Structure formats: C-alpha cells, structure tokens
Amino acid sequence: MERTGDKYPGLFGGTLAAWLGQPLVLGAAWLVLWRLSALMEYAPHASIWFPPAGLSFAAFLVLGFRPLPVLLACGIVVTFWSNALYGVSQPWTQTLAAGTLFSLAHVGAYWAGAAALRRLFVRGSGERLPTLIIAFLMLATLSALAASLLGTRALAVAGTLEAGSINETWIPWWIGDMAGAIVLGPLFAGLLVRGNSAAGDRLRELGLLRTDSPASFWLGKVALVIVLLALLMLVTAQFGRSELLAFAVFFLILPQMWITYTESALRVAASVAAFSVAAAVLVDVLGLMDQAMAYQFAVIVIAASSYFGLSVPVLIDQNRRLRNLVDADPLTGVDSRRHFFQRAQFELGRARRRDLPVSLVLFDIDHFKRINDEYGHTAGDRALVAVARTVRASLRGEDLIGRFGGDEFMVLLVGSGMNLALETAERLRRDLHGIEVGDRATLSGSFSAVEIGADERLSDAFERADARLLAAKRAGRDRLVGRDAHEA
C-alpha cells in the first residue's frame, strides 16, 4: 500500500479517518456505538456485545491521553440516557455520581491496558508481531475484565445496580466488552491510524501495510463469511441445534483466514468487524439471545485466529528478504559466493545427467584498488555495479553470475564447452572496455576459462580457473587465459 502524504488510499480515506480523532466526532461515534450495543443487551446495564469498548481501547492506544475528557463525558451521558430509557427514577445527583464512577471505571481500565500495549507497540518490530498480537489479546481481555468488575461495583455503589445483581451482571458485561475490544478494537485503531502519519509509519515497520486486492473481490469474500454465518444461525434457530456452532466455527474460520492471508490489516479488521456486527444483528432478529454468549465466543476465537494469521505473511516476507540478503550480493545484486556455488552445484549435476558440457569463467577488474584510491570508494562501487549489469546483460538466461569477493566475479556457462566459453569470456572482456569511471577512459579485466571435467569437482575446477586468472594478471592483465602454462 503506497502512502501519499498523510493519506492512505484504500477502503477508508485518510481524511475521513482523521475526523474520527476529533473530540466531538469521537464522542458522537462512541454514543452511536453504545446505542448499537442494545442489539445484544443482556440487562439494563450490560450487553454481550459492547462496541464502545473497542473504540475506547483503540482511542487510547493511538491517541494517548487526548480522548480522556470526551470519553469521561460519554460515560456520564449514557448513564443519564440509560436511566431515561428504562424509566429509572433517582435524583440527578445520584445519576451523576453513578455516571462519574462508571466513566472512571471504563476509562481507567481501557487507558491502563492501552498504555501498556502502546509501549510495546512503539518498541515492536515485524519479528515481534506475534508477541504484540498476544499482548493485545491479553491486555484487551484484562481491560475488559477490569471494566466489568469495576463498572458493576461502581453502579452498585451509586445505587443504580442492586448489589445482588453484580455476580449475574459482570460476566455478560465482561464478554460484551471483550468482544468489543478484541473484535472491533483493531478496526477502530486502524481508522485512527490512517489519520496519523507517525502511527502509520509504525504499522509499515511492522509489515502490516500490504497491497490490497480490488475492493469488489474483498467484499465478495466478506459476503461469503457472512452468508455462511447466516446459514448456520438460521439452521440453529429453525431446528434448535445449538451444538452445530462448535463444528461450524472451523468452516467460518476458513474464508476469514483467506481474507487474512490476502488483504491488508485494516481490511482484515474490517471483515472481522462485519462478521461481528452480522452476528449481533442475527442474534437479535432470530431471537437467539440464549445462545448469544456462544456466538460471541466464536466471533472472538475467529478474530484472534485472524490476527495471528496476519503475522504469517509478514514473517514470510521477512524471511524472503533475509534470504535475498544471504543469496544476493547486496551491492551488485548478483549471486553471493555461497549461493552461486549452491546453484552451480545443482546445475552441474543436472547438466551431467543430460550429458551437457559446463564451463566456468572467472574475472576481476584490473587495478581496482587504484580506482578506489583515485576516485573514491563510491566510484569503485559504481564500477562494480556497472560491471555486473553489463555482464548479466551479455549472458543467457540459464547462465549464472556471482561475486566471489572484492572485484572478482564468477560465471557458470551451462551447456557451453571450452570453445564457447572462450568466445563468451572474450566478449565479456571487450564489453568492460565500454564502462567508464570518473575521467578514466575505460575499465579492463583479466579473464580465465575452464571446462569442468566429467568427474571433476566444482571446487577443483574453480582452483584451475583461479590459477589461470592469476596467469592472466601476471601476463599483463586485460587478457583471457584459457589453458594452463604446461598446455601452451
């Protein structure tokens, strides 16, 4: 995913996402989500699906202390709102006290968890992504537990909740908050990050900003997940087979993991959120409230699996880059010495099975130290890059080129006998004359060539080629030696 300024193109626009970080918009969104939680309301003050918990956790994670005043105010507002909806008659001072205590419990729990995760997030790297995901799941779960325990007791102290109802209220409260924080928190965090370039850069360092597929393809995959969920819940509602859920989770995870492995982190979070919303709506519409906890746990399990799945493409990409660092010479891009010999050994074995000749060419740049001394090491590096580019352009696709070290290169010519190897080496020697360094007219190189014997080891052939290369240097450089002195 390419970044342009502070805008991240894709499903959600950067400007729209930035608005979510504004206090009034954040507060309005929190209140809307609180009202939406009524879809799975278990009791007047507890819902088995509580999206505001996800927004609170995400806001503190991305924005730090800034959301504190608006979220405190939201907690007080919804306490008055809830009492009005349920016709609770109590003095406004008591409602204010209840709202304040509830706000402090909710905000304190999620600020503490988010602050701890924020410290890990700042220090994290792609290699630590699985650890960060585990930390997120643990801290989100503990924050939800603290919010439920403190929240129920705060309302009991304020007289809004009967003391005897605490034990039957805090568990669904915890589940609802946990579902909101774990399932919806990453989506809200992703939206807030898209309005924050510094946080976006951290996600890029973690490897979480990947190129998306076309939006229509992604939406099709999301629709598949939701259709499977709807079919499951319809069967459950029609036939009362609640035990199907335990078996169906596997089939729901499969398409979700397909999304995880092919889409960016934000789209993965959005698909998990869509799955969660669909489950909440269907529970309400189909009257499955007695199974609501089981569905919420299923959603949480699928969400957790998806987040762990995000680390797989990141680790694969990191392994690929590490492999490239080992296999390729970092300056010229040709094979490293180790990788060249690995590939050469494989190609030699394959050529022998097909009864094809194989030849080895060695060369180095004449007076390379003088280039570094006269023009600087940067000029020397440019010369090496130009040599590698020129030689590679002159070889066939099946030929191999590697850098042995310093200014020395190796070429394996598969299917080439000695005569063709000499022709190729001579052509390469002349090609070097067209490369300029500083005010030096051209480069030159010393070359050697050997045909690898039918029973000869690659290392022995290399030693023969190296001896001929040394002979070319002693003979005056800028020449090709294709036979040993005793063969002359």
Image (tube, rainbow, N blue to C red):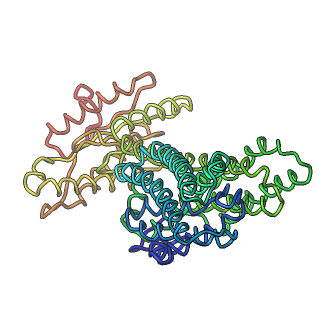
Q: In this rendering, does residue 11 appear at all?
A: no
**Which is nearer the eye, 442 or 39?**
39
Is the residue 309 above or below the residue 92 in the image? above
Q: Residue 156: x percent and y percent? A: 58, 54
Is the residue 16 above or below the residue 330 in the image? below
User: Seen from this angle, which residue lies furthest front?
Assistant: 91
Q: Residue 408: x percent and y percent? A: 25, 42
Residue at 41%, 26% (x, y): give it.
453
Residue at 23%, 57% (x, y): give it.
382
Q: Residue 103: x percent and y percent? A: 49, 62
Query: Which quadrant of the rendered structure holds the C terminus?
Result: top left
Is the residue 420 above or below the residue 226 in the image? above
User: Seen from this angle, which residue lies furthest right?
Assistant: 239
Image side of residue 236 versus residue 420, left or right: right
User: Seen from this angle, which residue lies furthest top?
Assistant: 455
**Which is nearer the eye, 262 or 473?**
262
Image side of residue 267 versus residue 285, left or right: left
Residue at 9%, 50% (x, y): give it.
370
Q: Residue 31: x percent and y percent? A: 58, 71
Residue at 78%, 41% (x, y): give it.
247
Snapshot quadrant of residue 468: top left
